[in-house]
Image (cartoon, grey):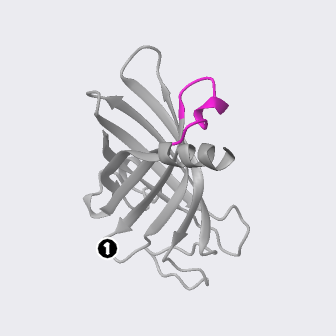
Amino acid sequence: MLLAGQAATAQDFRASEVRGGIFAHSADEPGNFFGVFNTERLQDVNVELLFDTPGLTDWVTLGELRPHVGATLNAGGLESMVYAGVSWTVPVFDTPVFVEGTFGGAVHNGNTNGTAIAPARDLGCSVLFRESASIGVQMTENASIMATIEHASNANLCNGNRGLTNMGIRLGWKF
């Protein structure tokens, strides 16, 4: 009976939403409004997959908790990362607006030995903490749009911790 219950739970774990968009790389560099209006920094593509997990949302009284995996890929030869974690999506009252926070980890292809030459960054460790925040609008039952900022750093666990902050816009599609 225990195995049957585990099999049923495993079947309920499924992909529920895909997201994608463009980000300004190193948005925390000097420039207009975190560099977002510097079109040279619009060089990251972000893709993310979220999953429904029965029972995980039981841990919160407001909103929804979902595991996610994703990647932010840089087309300009700078840092890219793959990541995984948990997203907490909370509706804003009885409106189509929502806010979301995430926490997890990332692995990147950036510099870790202190020899990065700007605009590259010395990220200190190969494995980083990653968090993000979004504000979005559920446009239809399936489609959403959100402004997102993501940050990855090693929390001073390694020498060198410049961190990486990207921000941009994403579209989501629930299925």
Q: Is residue 61 magenta?
A: yes
Is residue 133 positioned above or below 129 on the image?
Answer: above
Residue situated in front as seen by the camera: 101 or 30: 101
* In the rendered image, the vertical position of residue 84 relative to residue 90, given as above or below: below
* SS majority, magenta: loop
- Identify the residue at image location x=30%, y=71%: 75
Identify the element where label 1 is drawn.
loop
Pick whichever, 82 or 124, lies toward us.
82
The stretch of residues the image draws in magenta is 52-64
Identify the residue under disc 1. Answer: 76
Residue 53, percent across and down? 53, 42
Q: Quadrant of residue 39?
A: bottom left
Q: Residue at point 65% right, 73% down? A: 160
Residue 11, horizontal then vertical, whole percent: 48, 47
- Image quadrant where residue 140 sits: top left
Lateral position of residue 67 relative to residue 96, left or right = right
Query: Which residue is at the far top?
Result: 94
What percent of the width, then of the height, locates residue 157?
A: 73, 68
Residue at the front extreme, as displayed: 1
